[in-house]
Amino acid sequence: MGQRPIRFGTSGWRGVIGEEITLARTHALARAVGRWLRESGAPPRALVARDTRPGGEALVRVAAAALAAERIRVACSAGATPTPVAARAVVTRGFGAGLVFTASHNPPAHHGLKVIGADGAVLSEAPSRGIERLSEEWLAAPPPAAKPAAAARLDLVPEYVEALAGRLDLSALAAARPRVLYDAMHGAGAGVLDRLLARAGARVETRNGRRDARFRGRGPDPVPDRLAALAAAVRRARGLRLGLANDGDADRYAAVDADGRILSASQTVALLVDHLARTGRASRGVAISLATGSLVERVARAHGLAVSRHPIGFKWLSRELLEGRADCAGEESGGFVWVAQGADKDGILAGALLAELVAVSGAPLGARLAELERRHGPCHCGRTAVPASAGALERLAAVSAAPPGRVEGARVRAVDRSDGLRLELDDGFLMLRGSGTEPALRVYAEASSAAGLRARLGRGARWLGAGASGKLAIFRRKSEPSR
């Protein structure tokens, strides 16, 4: 009897170690990637990398052997490597694909695999579905275990740091010497973003910088309830300062203002778009997700930048960059990239640009944000989640089939079913969808006030059957959490 199929979500394959993620299933999937790579016409060379999670090195060895059995030349990263570092190396070193073993921000018991194409972005839908079909063949009739493969070990961090440093205003950083408190969350970003900023002249204090396979038992997700200590430390510090954090594989980021306020992803994307446009580094367009707050759109259009919205999942935004329609892309869950550095989300890049912004302006992030909100209106965004039970899924289907005409008194202006259900309202939106990385249903919202946001998220949670409050995961003081 065949095993359950391997399926990719919004950002690759993920699951619990020892259940969904096993060595045998990894072997089957890597064989499928190897076969796809040979048939795609891309260079038959693959880079295999990992984050700090348990069993990562064993997964790398299995994948390398499986790829070699498919006549793919393999190189492996030397130790735990951030996903953005590996993704950039796929392009600069001419690999046909990259396999990065990571579960990103998920809890320590999870692992996964991101497959990166030769263009440096997570694979789009068509090749992902093709690899899934090929993996089913290997699962149905697994071959003998592949022989261990000899593979070069590459330290990819120095070239990444050198390239990013060349794109920053190092003179401004050296002159302002901002104090940066950086929470690496025991992940692969430790020793990369902090190293880069210290080299540029910033005064860097690294927290949770010791890489740990289980992240000290906590999920490496930079959301508010895991950033309280960082926020308190930033508030206590003196001088020009900010806080930064990365998730487990450093493709996501979060930022803390000088007063300890944890900024929302929509707020930081708006700041980054404004900064790149002001400095002449963004002139074509911006790609954002359906759940990103409208402040980003208003700021971009004020700079004459075209704005396009896409389903959740950074792979959709990457297409806009690779096809030349956008210079940068951002989403509501802490993903951002500027095309000069790459095509997939990069939490190290985002953090470095935010530090540069503080140095160039000589003021905290909140000062520039206040200016943007005075000109374009405030940003109240957030999300909540409920378990993806059968009942909740049925209720999501029911409300999608017959959505209401009003939500908490606000008129529904448009209905979008391209990715779950998104209701465009007079003063924001309400969106419901299944998570592509966890067994949960997400509720996203934007409103004209913090109270309106809480009410709107509560309404969405109640539609799915949660309690009155729905355990709202919203940011205090105009903030929102990662997806």
Image: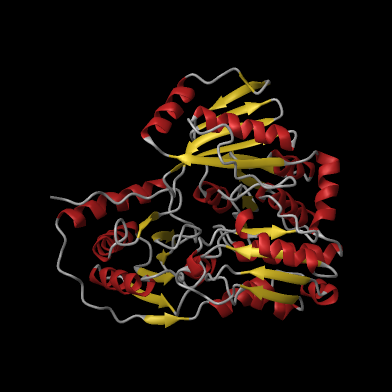
Position of 196 with respect to 146 (left or right) is right
Position of 129 with respect to 321 (left or right) is left
> In front: 40, or 244?
244
Report which quarter residue 360 is drawn in: bottom right
Residue 74, horizontal then vertical, whole percent:
35, 74
Position of 155 with respect to 136 (left or right) is right
User: Going 62% across and 50% down the picture, which residue do you hit?
Assistant: 330
Position of 212 with respect to 72 (left or right) is right
Residue 12, horizontal then vertical, whole percent:
41, 54
> In front: 454, or 299?
454
Instruction: Check the image and tell me how it is coloured.
Output: secondary structure
> In front: 433, or 98?
433
Residue 86, horizontal then vertical, whole percent:
49, 69
For the question of whether residue 146 can be seen, the reply is yes
User: Going 75% across and 47% down the picture, which residue do you hit?
Assistant: 477
For the question of whether residue 283 can be seen, the reply is no
User: Going 40% across and 76% down the picture, which residue do you hit?
Assistant: 76
| Number of numbered callouts drawn | 0
Seen in the picture, residue 177 relative to 398 is either above or below; the reply is: below
User: Going 46% across and 59% down the picture, which residue do you hit?
Assistant: 107
Residue 60, horizontal then vertical, whole percent:
35, 72
Seen in the picture, residue 5 relative to 84 is either above or below; the reply is: above
